[in-house]
Amino acid sequence: MGLVAKSKNEPDVARYADMFSAMGTEPRLRIMRLLLSAHPGGLVAGDIGSELDIPASTLSHHLEKLKNEDLVKVRRESTFLWYSANIDTLQDLLGFLYAECCTRNKAIEPEAFVRISTVKGGRGLQPSARTHQ
């Protein structure tokens, strides 16, 4: 059996791997889940730290890592920094992950596996149990 050839999209693989790596620690994954629960408004850094019991200096490091991979957005309002999950980046990341889903055996249509909802006020990323007949 041959190895899968590197495609012209190989830089994308490295980019997405960096995103997964950024979320690959327990505190950062907890931060992402919290920010998703507060979408679209987000939370101020102090509230994130308080809710997750993460010291400010450590939280700053984690948020910077997530921001560097474009997984979170930050906006300044007066003296407060508001952080929110970057839904566009997360949708791209999941789209990349599922792009080749079941393309070899056609058991499940990729669109049926994960549906990305863009309906305002919707729940966002929603799994679907439909299978290809």
Image: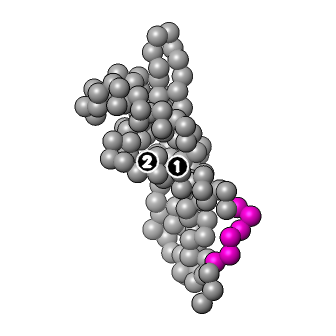
Residue 42: give x, y in percent of width and height. Answer: 45, 29
Residue 4: give x, y in percent of width and height. Answer: 64, 78
Q: Amino acid at mark 1?
A: Met
Give me the residue at 38% from left, 38% from top.
Answer: 31
Which label is found at residue 23? 2
Left-right relation of 58 to 132? left
Q: Nearer the viewer, residue 30 or 101?
A: 30
Residue 7: give x, y in percent of width and height. Answer: 71, 68
Location of the C terminus (image quadrant): bottom right
| Magenta span | 4-9
Say which element carries label 2. Answer: loop
Residue 95, quarter of picture = bottom right
Give me the residue at 46% from left, 60% from top.
Answer: 127
Q: Is residue 123 above or below residue 109?
A: above
Q: Which residue is mark 1?
A: 19
Secondary structure mainly formed by the magenta segment: loop
Magenta residue check for 110: no
